[in-house]
Image (tube, grey):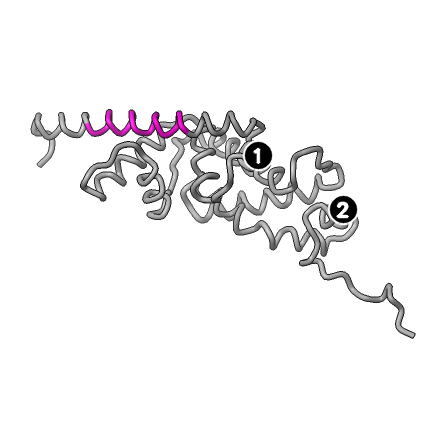
């Protein structure tokens, strides 16, 4: 007679909470979590660092740190995914401080188009707009950059972003609208500066 307990667990069918419980004793369960979130975390880190090498290195460190601390992880309203993003955010922040460099964000065309469609203002020259938007984005405070990336790159809801950033859904919604207004103001400042340069003959 077949032993009903001999059936292997299909890890891909388990939710995060079940996998985390198993992962505290079974590395295979953590491997499933790794596969589930590797691309998301890498994408987030890449947009915060702007280059493949550092993104790969920091992504590996995120999962190494998660594995080493998973035995102490207790959900308490912070899902495993949000916990990973918090680890990634802290590692990237440390990376910027350690390097003593200006933050360089490599936003792709998709993000640029998404942001532009949400922005109150539009200008006709797409290439110039992209450059101005990237410059304006880099001037944003760290928390607003994080919000933009989670919103447009990871396509998260305000509630999900709130869990990761430790804020209420309402606070995230408010911050989102303030961020769009700040982007508009920064772009207007940049556009004005560009116009002044052209008028003063600094171009050409």
Check the image and report above or below for 9 versus 95. Answer: below
Residue 182 highlighted magenta (yes or no)? yes
Please tell me which of labels 2 and 1 falls first in the chain: 2
Contact, CB < 8 Å: mark 2 with mark 1?
no
Which residue is at the front of the view, 103 or 135? 135
Looking at the rendering, the stretch of residues picked out in magenta corresponds to: 177-191
- Point out residue 198 in the picture as x, y percentages from the top left corner: 10, 30
Image quadrant in which you'd find residue 50: top left
Prevailing SS of the magenta stretch: helix
Q: Position of residue 93 (x, y in %)?
A: 51, 31
Q: Which of 44 and 17 lies nearest the eye of the viewer? A: 17
Q: Position of residue 199 (x, y in %)?
A: 8, 27
Q: What element carries label 1?
A: helix
Task: Give SS at disc 2.
Answer: helix
Residue shown at 31%/31% (left/top)?
Answer: 136
Q: Residue 164 carries which label?
A: 1
Q: Which residue is drawn at 49% across and 31% down?
A: 98
- Foreground residue, 150 or 31? 150
Taking the image as shown, residue 102 lies to the left or right of residue 75, namely left
In the image, what residue occupies the spot 48% across and 29% down?
97
Q: In which quarter of the image is the C terminus?
A: top left
Q: In which quarter of the image is the N terminus?
A: bottom right
- Tell me the residue at 32%/34% (across/down): 119
Q: Residue furthest bottom?
A: 1
Q: Quadrant of residue 133?
A: top left
Task: Give above or below for 26 relative to 149.
Answer: below
Q: How far apart are marks 2 and 1 (CA)?
A: 21 Å
Q: Label 2: which residue?
A: 21
Badge 1: residue crowd in 10 Å (few <14, some 14–19, many ≥20): many
| Residue 6 quadrant | bottom right
Left/right placement of residue 34 relative to residue 175 reads right
Q: What is the x, y in percent for residue 37?
A: 58, 49
């Amino acid at each position: 007679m077949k032993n009903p307990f001999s059936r292997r667990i299909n890890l891909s069918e388990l939710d995060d909470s079940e996998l985390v419980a198993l992962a505290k004793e079974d590395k295979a369960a953590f491997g499933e979590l790794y596969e589930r979130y590797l691309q998301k975390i890498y994408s987030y880190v890449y947009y915060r660092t702007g280059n493949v090498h550092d993104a790969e290195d920091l992504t590996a460190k995120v999962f190494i740190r998660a594995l080493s601390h998973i035995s102490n992880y207790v959900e308490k309203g912070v899902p495993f995914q949000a916990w990973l993003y918090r680890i990634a955010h802290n590692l990237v922040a440390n990376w910027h401080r350690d390097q003593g460099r200006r933050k360089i964000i490599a936003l792709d065309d998709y993000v640029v188009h998404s942001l532009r469609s949400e922005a109150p203002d539009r200008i006709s020259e797409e290439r110039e707009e992209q450059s101005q938007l990237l410059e304006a984005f880099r001037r944003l405070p760290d928390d607003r950059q994080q919000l933009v990336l989670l919103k447009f790159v990871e396509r998260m809801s305000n509630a999900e972003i709130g869990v990761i950033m430790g804020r209420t859904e309402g606070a995230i919604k408010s911050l989102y609208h303030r961020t769009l207004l700040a982007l508009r103001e920064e772009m207007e400042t940049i556009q004005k500066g560009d116009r002044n340069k052209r008028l003063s003959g600094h171009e050409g």
